[in-house]
Structure formats: C-alpha cells, structure tokens
Amino acid sequence: MSRTCSLLWGLSDVEEKMGLRQSLQGADVPQARTIYLNEPLRNTFCENSISTAKYSKWSFLPRYLYLQFSKTANAFFLFITVLQQIPDVSPTGKYTTLVPLLVILVISGIKEIVEDYKRHMADKLVNSKNTIVLRQNAWQMILWKEVNVGDIVKATNGQFLPADMVLISSSEPQATCFVATSNLDGETNLKIRQALSETAAMKTEKQLSSLSGKIKCEGPNFHFNSFVGTLYLNSESPISIGPDQILLRGTQLKNTEWILGIVVYTGFETKFMQNAVKSPLKRSKVEKVTNMQILVLFLLLLVMSLVSCVGAILWRDRYRAEPWYIGKKDYDYHSFGFDLLVFIILYHNLIPISLLVTLEIVKYIQALFINWDEDMHFKGSNVCAMARTSNLNEELGQVEYLFSDKTGTLTCNIMTFKKCSVAGIMYGQSPCSISDSYEFNDPALLQNFENDHPTREYIKEFLTLLCVCHTVFPEREGNNISYQASSPDEAALVKGAKKLGFVFTARMPNSVTIEAMGEELTFEILNVLEFSSNRKRMSIIVRTPEGQLRLYCKGADSVIYERLSENSLFVEETLVHLENFAKEGLRTLCVAYTDLTEIEYEQWLVMYKKASTVVQDRIQSLEDCYDRIEQKFLLLGATAIEDRLQARVPETITSLLKANIKIWVLTGDKQETAINIAYSCKLLSGEMPRIQLNANSLEATQQMINQNCQDLGALLGKENDLALIVDGKTLKYALHVEVKKSFLNLALSCRTVLCCRLSPLQKAEIVDVVKKQVKAITLAIGDGANDVGMIQTAHVGVGISGNEGMLATNNSDYAIAQFSYLEKLLLVHGTWNYFRVTKCILYCFYKNVVLYIIELWFAIVNGFSGQIIFERWCISLYNVIFTSLPPFTLGIFERCCSQESLLRYPQLYRISQTGDIFNIKVLWIQSINAIVHSFILFWLPAKMLEHDMVSQGGYTTDYLFLGNFIYTYVVVTVCLKAGLETLSWNKFTHFAIWGSIMIWLGFFAVYSSLWPTVAVAPEMTGQVNMALMCPHFWLGFFIVPIVCLIQNVAWKSIRNTCHRTLLEDVREMESSGVQVLRRDSARRWLETQDAPEVQAHGARAGGPGAARGEARRGRAGRSSARWEGVGVRAGCSPPLTQSRRILPVREANATPDAPPVECGTPGHPDLGGDGVTGFERVGARTDAGATRALEARHRPSLPLCTPLQPQVSRSAAGGYGERRRRSKLAAVLRGDAQLGLLETNSRRTRLLRVWKFPDSSGGQPASSAGVSTHTMRSGPQGRLSPGAQLWVFACEERAGPRTHLLADP
Amino acid sequence: MAMNYNAKDEVDGGPPCPPGGTAKTRRPDNTAFKQQRLPAWQPILTAGTVLPTFFIIGLIFIPIGIGIFVTSNNIREIEGNVFMYYGLSNFYQNHRRYVKSRDDGQLNGDPSALLNPSKECEPYRRNEDKSIAPCGAIANSMFNDTLELFQVGNASDLMPVPLKKKGIAWWTDKNVKFRNPPGTDPLAERFKGTTKPVNWVKPVYMLDSDEDNNGFINEDFIVWMRTAALPTFRKLYRLIERRNDLHPTLPAGRYYLNITYNYPVHSFDGRKRMILSTISWMGGKNPFLGIAYIAIGSISFLLGVVLLVINHKYRNSSNTADITI
C-alpha cells in the first residue's frame, strides 16, 4: 500500500485525511524558505535553468552502460564476454559475443541519444527565452536561466512566466491579472489573480528598488492550488499571501498589459517542474513470463553444459588419456570447472541476445500504431490516442477487469442544467418527453415567478443564488457573455440561470454584478468559502444590494441536509425530488442560504483571519473555520444537471462484456445516479438481480456479505448475471481484513459491480485488492485527478483526455479521448500486440534453441571437446543479421485476423486474455519442437555427408563444410518456421523471410572469399564454391527444412481441423470473402426497410471492412452496427446487412421482380426435410414481403425466413457440375436452423434441398453447416432447369434473446 | 519517457490539444501502413487446404528418392575415373584442441608466421628453438602410410597402377589458401629457420620431388589439413585416371595393394581402410539421401491420406460455418 500511496500525490485532501501527507513528506520535508526582497544575493536557491535530459555529454557513457547492464540479459552477455577473454576457454574466439552486444548497445544507444537530444534542444529553447527583471534599479532583459529567487520580474501580455512568483502589482485596476493555466492542469478557463492591496501601488522602479523586507513561505511542493506565505514589509504587520497571489511557471499571462512579481521558486522547485514526476515503472505480465523463460533457458544451458562436461570426462576415460594426435596438455589445467566454462560459452547463445532490443523496437512501433490510429482520433477535440509507454502494449490484450470512472469517462462531462426543485415544486421536463433540447425548458418556473405565485420570493432567491454563488468568470464579446469555469457544473448552473433571466454579467474582485430580470444588482463579495471534495460544498458570503449579510451555499445533499436549520421548509418534498432526479441519472446539488448578523460575521472574520495566516495545516484550519459559519441553512431547493453518456458507450460496454471483461464502475457520485448511468450504458439490465450493500457498521456489513454469499451457494465463485452495488462507507468496512475475502468472493461472482461515493483513495484500494486477489490483469480508466490513484495502481492505466485537466492523462499509460476507443484499443491493438509480442518472443527463443542445440549434437561426435561446427562469426551474426528480420515482421505486422473481425467477435479477445498461447508450458513445447528440429538439422546432413564423398570431383570435405550445410538449412528452416507462425503475410513478411535466406547466401559467398585478402575466416575459404556446386547441398536444401516443418504443418492443420477455434472460423471467413448473416442486422433491416441505400464498398485499400465502417459511421442513431457485416470481397452486390431480400445468385441487378418463394417446406417427401413446422412466404424486394417477414418474426412458432445472398458466380442454366468458381457462404444460425437451396425461373419456384441443423444445445457454437458440392449434387433435384436461377436461403427458428451468432460459448 | 514534463509545451504554449486552438488537424494519415491495413495473404492451415501440398511432396520426393538411390547404387562398376581414398575411424579430427591447432597465416606463406607461428599451435609450435613448419597438431599427425596399387598380371607379375597425386585437393586450397613462403629460392632455402614437425620423418619441403606439389602446397598435406566432421572419415588419396575409352579403368582381375605402414592407430582403437570408388554426378556411394527422400515422400503421402480422412470426417460433422456450393 505504501507504494500506492506515494503515488497518489494528486489527492491532497484525501491524503491529509488519511494521514498520508506526512508519510509522503517524510522523505524530503520541504524547508520553509525566507526570501529577502531586493537582496537576491542572499538567496541560494536552485537555478532557474532546467534540464529534463537524462544524460549530459560526460555522464552519457557511464549512465547508459549502467542502465543497460542492470538488465539481467545484458549483464549475462557481458559476463560471457569477460569469460571469453580467458585464454583457451572460448571455443568461439574472444570477440564473438562482444561484437553483437556492441551492435545491440549501439542501436539502443542511438535511440537514447536521439531522444535525449530532443530533450536537450527543448531545454535550451526554454532556458534561453527572454524576460525582464529589475537589476541595479533598472529593468534589464535577461535569459530565463538567469532569473533568481527574489528577483522582481516584469511580464507582459501573452508571455509565459519564467518562474513561480508572488504578484506585486499589475496594470489592471485593483492589481488583478488573468492567467491561462492549461499547461499545468489542462483547464482551459482563465484564472484571476490579485495582488495584495499593500503592494498594489508599487509600480515604478524607484518604489520597487526601495522595497525591503522578506517573504516567508513554504518549501517547494507540487500542489498547484495551494500556497502559504507571509509578507513582512518593514514597519508593517505581516500580510498573508495565498494562492490568489501566486503566478506559476508554465502559465501564460492573458488580458493583462503587464504584471510585476517577486520570484519565489525557480527551476526544478517550481510547482510546474515538481509535478513532472516519474511515473511508476510498470512491467507487463508477458515481460515477467519472459524473464521466467529466460531463466528456464539458463537452466537448460547449465544442464547442457554439465551433461557435456560429464561427456567429456567419459570420453577421456575411454582412452585413459587423450589420443596422441591431440596436442598433449597439462591435465589439471582441463579441470571440470574449466570445461564447464567452455561449454557455457559454447551454448550461451541459447539465450537470445537480440531479444531485448528487438522487443524494444517492436513495442515502440506498436505504440506508434496506436498513436497513428485514425479510428481513435477524436475530431471533437482533435486529439489522437497516445501511448505514453510502450511497455504495456501486449497487456492491453489481457485485460480481465476494467475499472471505470463514471463522470467524464462514461459520460461527456458536459453539464446541462436540466431540472430544479424550488420551494418544494419540481420544474423541468418530464422524464418521458424525449426532446432534442437538452436544456431546461419548463416555462412554469417563470410563470410562477411572474404571476406572484406564493413561492415567488423563493424562486428569486434561488435564481439569485445560482447567479452569485460560484467562481465562474464572465467573458464579454460584444453582447454575448460566455462563462469560464473550472467546474462544468457551475457553468451549467450559471448558464441555466441566464436563460431564466438572471444573468451574471460581471465579476470584480470584491463584487458580483447580475441582471435580475433586467434589473442590475451588485453583490459585494465578502468571502468565498471554496469547494473541496472533502467539504462537498462551496459557500459565498455577500452583502446584498439591500445591505444584508447573507451566506449562499450549494453542495451535496448530504452535507446541506445536516446543516439545515429547524425552520427550514420543503425539506421532505425536496428530498423526494432529489431522489427522482438521481433516478434519472442527474447530478444533484442542494442550494440553501442563511442570513448572518453583523456581530456573528465580525466574530467569524477574526477567526478566519487567524486561520488564514497559519503556515502549517492552513487548509485544515480554514475548513474548520468555514464549518463554523456554514450553519442553520434555509433550504431553497435543488438543481439537477445532466451529464450525457459519451457516444457509443453502451455498445462499447456490451462488446467488452462479450470479451469477458468484467466492468466495475467506481464513482464518487451518488448511488442512484450511478445505477442510472449503469442502466443507460447497458451495464445493468432490467432482469438482472441486484445485490445492494449499504451498511453502517462493520458487523452489519459482514452479516450482509455472509448472507449474500450463502444465498449464492454453489454459484459463488462463478460468474453470475448479478450486479453488486456498494457505497463508499460500506466498502470501507468491506475491505477490512476479516471481511475482505468474502466480500471479494461475492464481488467476483457478479457480472457487474458498481461502487459509489468512493474517495479517490478507495478507488485505488479496490483496484489494488482485486489485482492481488484474482491475479488478473486490471485496467483503470478515468479522466480526473481523483482517478490518478487507480490509474497508477492498475496494471494498465488509461486516461481520458477530457475536460478535467491533464492530470489523469499525465499519469496514464495510454491516453484516449473517448471511452468508446477502449474497444479498439483493447480488442484490436491489445489482441494484435499480444499475438505479436508473444510470437516474437517465442520465435526468438525457438531460433536460438534450434541453432545452438546443434552444438550439443556435434559435441557427441567430437568427444565433447567444445568444438564449434559453424564458423564463429556466423554464429554471432545469426541473431544480428541472418534471422533478425522475421522477429520484427512477426512483432510488427502479424495479424491474427482483421480489425473488423476482432471488433465483431469480441470473444476473440479471450484468446489473448487467458494467455494460453504464452506460458512456461508453451515455451517447453516450443523448445522441444526446436530440439527436434535441431536434431533433424544436424543428423540428416551429417548422414548425408557421412562418407565425405559428395563432390563431383571426389574431393573430401571438412567439418565446416558440414557446418555450412547445416547453417544454411537452419536459416531456411527458421525463416520458414517464421512464415508458418505468420498468420498474415504482407510484403514485409515476404521480404523478411525470403530476404533473410538471400542475405545468408550472399554473405556466405562473400565471406568465403575474403581470406587471405582480409584476415578473417581462413577456414571458410572456398567453402561456397564447394557447397553450392555440391548436388547434395541442393538436395538437402529442399528436404531438410521440409522434414523439420512437415510435422508442424501436419500438426497445425490437424488441430485446426479437429478443434476448430473461433479464430480459425473467422479467418476462414475472411479469406474466402464470405458473408455472415446476423440476426440483429436482419432485424434492423426489417425495422428500417425503407432505408437501405447501397453502400459503396471494397474500393478502399483496406478492403470492404474499412469502407463499411466509414459508411456506417455516417448513419444516424446509436445503432450497434459499426462493424457489422462481413463484406463481400469481389461481390457486385450490396452487403448482406442491408439487402434483406432474396437476390438471385448470379447477379443482383438481373432480377427486376423476384417471385415469391416458398421455403421451409418440411416434411415434403421430395425435399428430404422432415418434421419442421409450417410455411412462410417471403416476398422479395417489396415492402409487402418485408412486412410479411416482419409479421413472421412476431409469430414465434414460425421460423424466420432469411434469405441469404451468396457470392456465387455460375452459369444459370448449367448444372452444379459447371461451377467455375468456388465460393463460400457462411450462415451462422442459432436455434433450429435450415439452409435451403431453391431455384426459380420464369414460371415457378422449386425448393431443391433443405439442410437442417438441430440446435446444438448449450455451449456449442451455433448451428451452422458445411455442405459440400457432392451432397448437393446427389440431392433429389440434381439439375437445374434451363434459365433458372439459384437462390440460397436460411431459416432459423427464433431462439433466445441472444443474437450473437458465431460461436458464443 | 519517464518524465511527463515536456519543455516544448512551454514553448508552443499549450497542452497537446488546445480546444478550438490550432486549426491544424492532428488526424493521423490514412495510409494502409499506418492504419495497419496493408494487403496481406492469410494462409489457412486446415486438413483441406494442406492436403494437396502433402500429396505433391509425396509425388515429387518418391521419384527423386528412387532416382538418387539408383544413381548412388550404380557406383559399383569401375568405369571412368577411379578415386582412391584412405579411411580412418575413431580418429577425432574434429576435436577442439586439434582443430584449432594450426596457423593459417603460416600455411598461406606469411614469412613472419613461418618463423613465429601462432600460439594456437602449442605444443607443436617450436622445437629446439626453431619454429615448426607446418606447426600444430593437425600437421604433426599427418597420415603417412603409403599405398601402392598393382595389377596382378597373367604371370603373377605386378604391374603398378598409375596413381595420380595431383588434383586431389580443392582448387581454392591449392591456389589460395596454401602457399609456400615467397621467393624464388629453392624451397629448402625458403623454409630456412624452421624445423619439421615432431612426428614427421622429413621436412615439409621434401614431401615430394615435384616443385608444384611440395612444401605447403603438397596435396596430400592439404587434404589432411581439412579436418573431417566426424570421427570416421575418408580422405582422397590418389586418382586413377582412365586411359582410353575402350578399357575400363580398372579391368577385372587380381590386384595387389602394398601398404607401407607408418601410421599408429592402435593406441586409440582406430581402424584404417582403403576405398576405391567412382563418382557419379552426386558424389560417391551413399544411399542415405535416396532413402531419406523416399521415406519423406512416403510419410508425406501417408500424412496426406490421414489428412484426407480427417478432412472427410470433420467436414461433414464439423461446425464450420461454410457451405461450399
């Protein structure tokens, strides 16, 4: 937990409450500092120049090397390199590991340098910007980096501020200024700052130069919105400085001619830089498994070395001494340990040296693909998806638990004032009225106001409060007033009031002007009691135009209700209304006021002044102080604000649920609101039973949970169609040690979990608990500062770049603009990346095992002497050159199936989610496969060359001749194996596979003719001529890789045939350009049968899917149709999704009037069908026909007859035998289904054949059919009549509500 | 990117997306590469799709295998050039310390390496303060039996079969890799300052009388220096060239092989052999490859049949979503 907490720096108030702030600051408590005015030299604080670069010129090499060699694999290779320097140990020479290692280090190094160079340049640019500073009593232009603490800086409009400073004075009246803080917090509204009245007059050089005194303030910290300081001017009493006087580095001066400020923090001590923290390093599951696998390989390496050592001992024992022809050596010298080192060096390449750098590059490009994704570009704010880390790309494919924030994540966070309740009367449109206008449009309120309704005064007060009690800024452009607000709720309320005739027109530092029904009123603002998530309310103390002291307050119902005075009216009615609002998913606020007496206020003011100058714990003492005066409220009413769902949220959620992702909504909002949102985004459904946990004590919670667990009984621990709803208070108890386990059991047995009223810390805690308990991959998505905790805690954190600032985005691993992009991010990028990364890793392991186990086989015949069979540099370059490309193409371009299919069949996500294709077991299988391959690759050529008489000249050969044979075959086999693993070959794949083989052959040719011109590889001299001229080489060239791979091919194809997976089905459909019938698409057509315009498709490079996606996006409505309907590859007709008509097989446009057809004629003796009910007539192309079909749909006993349009091109008059082109039609049907074939000509329609498929009950994939040509030809009506056209249709009985057809296990 | 600070923000002025800000759209390029829609071929491996491949492999490999097998076995008749090999077994020419014990610089005639051979040659690097030429264990253990072949005539007289010494080494070895020390002096002069390998009877420049086959470029020596891959190996020893078209190279009859026994193999349980062979287009007799081709062809064919059965069985009862019409 401590780790988690230390990351939650964005949550000051919560931390404080939890006592975590201390622990956080414990490490480096920032010292309070004293700044002496006009004496910059007395200050020794950090410089204002910043450097975000990782390295300097001199520190690069040591730091970089340290970083690299702290990676285990690199350290291992360094160790091997060192070993190789021991004389006579290395079988492969001294530098054969060093060189590839250097190559790899150089590649990573270049990447680092390029990245760091960019940072250096950016730093330089920033550091050398100009600013004006008062030095030696005159304004001087200096560079940013020369600014010191204590300097007086002058900034002009539009400038960025060079450091954090205290505002002294400005050009504006009352020494105000405006700043844009979007760099810091992403909020786009302007903020107002105001200088202290004591300093406001200091504007001239002379005044400023004579300024003396000091500023005491807290040490540097990262809280943007807090500053605690005190100004001591000589001969004056100390003056408190607060956040209102602070101008931060990174902000931009707006609408202000100039300002003067005293610098208080510089460089890295500015709040801006303090916020640039390092994100926690997250490692993906795959990475962990990979480390494990490297360890396994290391063990294998040790075992092989030991076996070889023993072999060497046995070999020597056979002769008691070594044969005479081998140079005699001192025997002790060749001890066991020495041999072990030899063999470790010999086999060390089992561990793939290039894996790390390959993965680094691959993941970098994968991240680029995410950034480049057009589908994740949000036009609304012109934001692309951004992968802020590339470590977790494949983790996106394994997510099992999704924790989502509600506001701003599921919803737009665009607030509209929708309803209100004033004095016990509810206003606003009724829930059933559907209107395009999202705003408040109930005239009754104004009527009541104008017609002297008894509640008139309350209405006036209510609207006045909305106009006055807020922190919104008006911005005038001509006659238009727009509002700048940090809280969208406030803006919505002010806008709502404006519409009702109460217009907030101007804000002065000490007053607010409104126009109430044309009458201008000015309220003097005495105090603003700010909002905080802890207080859940904000108040404002004003002097009304009448001179009355009044406190207006608006806030959450819970905090307002506990502060109501006994005299307050409409308490009950408002409560009912609040519930109603919440049920509709609206956000509610209560508004209340209280009148203050002068004495009361004076007394409070004293307290307030005291609290506001406290240096330590100022916020807490202020809150206590506010609490004193926020009492005895009189309730006015409540407001209801709507926060609309983001586009496509329900569809996304449905699709993610299908992908077996459990979705938990964690929100700070009210339970009712949360439930409502959950309904509207289809997370909850009407028939879904709900378990609600609301308890006030530990015991009650425990009892409730146990009760529910008991009720579930055997279902506990399985996934049930249940929803669990918990509130924050109960959750606090539920996460107690003794209850935690049963609570989690319960929660994990539910399909949906809603947690409401959570604090940010609780959000993080839940994620943490689930993460530890279920060991599944978790993803947290959120948009606000309160989500930072969970975003950093979860395995994958996704930030929504929305209206609530950059905090969530800056702490996330992936940033997207809309919740719905999660679908693409997870289902497409996640799945692909998972496939890519795992395949790339497994393949890297495979190719290394294949090559280097061969050394073991060779050791058997060379007396375990450690001799290598290949030329030493060939061994080193294997990973760096000859087989370096296939891992890249696997890692970058591999596609298990198309994006459209992945989105259409979210079930495909489960393949990557379960992680079955990548674990230790898979590695073992792969390794054993590699060992078998290496066995074949060694022994087959060895046997081929057994008698050394293979060349046409009768020449005998040497060991390296065999080695080169084997090496060539290894390269070919390994490259082809990459091809076998590749599910999708594009041009790069071809290049990598064939290119690698060519590169090796080319290298072989060149390398064999270097000696003695270049002093390398004398043993290779002449090898290429001999090898390539040798018929055995070419005979082996074809047979050896085939022998290796034939088993893989056979095994793969048998498995694919016998245990068909969904993926295989989908791939097959894709590659044959098949259509898929989907019931829901059929239904949609029936509902909108006038609609379909034929879509253009197939034109784009991306094929039909792309175009269709495009076309569909254009359609109105929230249909779930974005990716529906697989296209027709070469079809001339519209895709099935929109052609709900029987079309002739041959050409779509050749049938002006399709005759009605009969289908589903079961029991007809000629037709071979038996025992199905009734007829259905379906007219084609006519509305009448469609209507009839629609009717059929409502008669459940009759099958829905859905004609399909197959992609067959054939001679109309010919028999089946004349088929020229094969084409496939996929009909995926649920329930009892039939497929039929009928024939029409001008006179009649004949049913040729019906195939029936009984519903395969339960978990099996939906009934579907595979019917061969043969079967059809042997049907009762074997030949078509002349001129006839062929039709295919499908009937399915309506079964169940589930409409997802293809394999729904 | 460990830091989330980006100094550029301060310069450009704005978070990544100022709403309503820059008019420039960040919409990513719609290229097939960036959108990952590159056209691609999706191979589908099912029994049905790979069936033909297996049969084709079977159909191609079996005939090839038979062809190879027949060719290899036809090498019986002694026609054309006959190659004479000696064979050693249980001789580990591929032992690590043996393989590396040579100096290719020296063998290439490098004068400095001649007098100062590489350390790899130890312990056959120097003898009595003189460098050994050729140095190293390989050279030291050169095969030095001599084989002479005689045809037994009608009157039991022995007619020597002419054995050709040259043309048994790789062209590149003879002409590129192995060179005598440079100079025009007699070989003995050029090898001055060196001594013969320990086990040798005579120095390297006295291996043969023929200047072109003496010293480092002696072909027997070159052949020996190519260390064999396996502990049982053959080395080409002599060529028996065909004299005219009418007679077989070695006509049927009795032959007498005279072996001068020098080379000790008993200490390591070694065996020596002498092999006479002709060479076909694909080398000497070795039926292995032919058998391998036939075997793989057959296995492939069998697998094809198995797949056919599987395909048949699963196609009709399978849950595939396909109808073939």
Image (cartoon, rainbow, N blue to C red):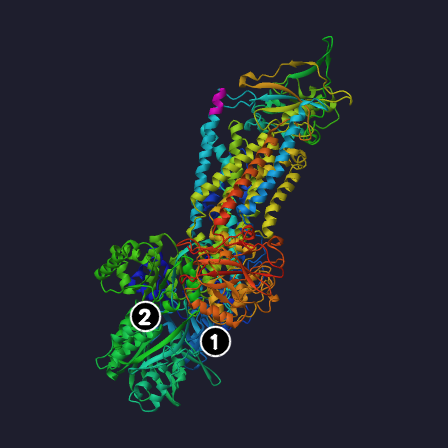
- In this rendering, the answer to whether B77 lies above or below A846 is above
> Residue A1208 vs residue A492: left or right?
right
Does dot 1 land on a helix, a strand or a loop?
A: strand
Chain at tag 2: A
Q: Is residue A307 left or right of residue B189?
A: left
Tell me residue A354's x, y (percent): 52, 45
Position of the C terminus of chain A, as image quadrant, is bottom left
- The residue nearer to you, when weighing A37 against A878, is A878
C-alpha gap between disc 2 and disc 1: 42 Å
User: Magenta segment range?
Assistant: A314-319
Q: Which is more foreground, mark 2 or mark 1? A: 2
CB-based contact (under 8 Å), mark 2 and mark 1:
no
Look at the image and say whether residue A318 sits in the magenta stretch.
Answer: yes
- Residue B8: image tag: none
Quadrant of residue B179 within the rendered picture = top right
Residue beneath label 1, please? A254
Instruction: Answer whether residue A8 is magenta in the image.
Output: no
Amino acid, disc 2: Glu
| Residue at x 61% of width, y 49% of height | A991
Residue A672: mark in rendering: 2
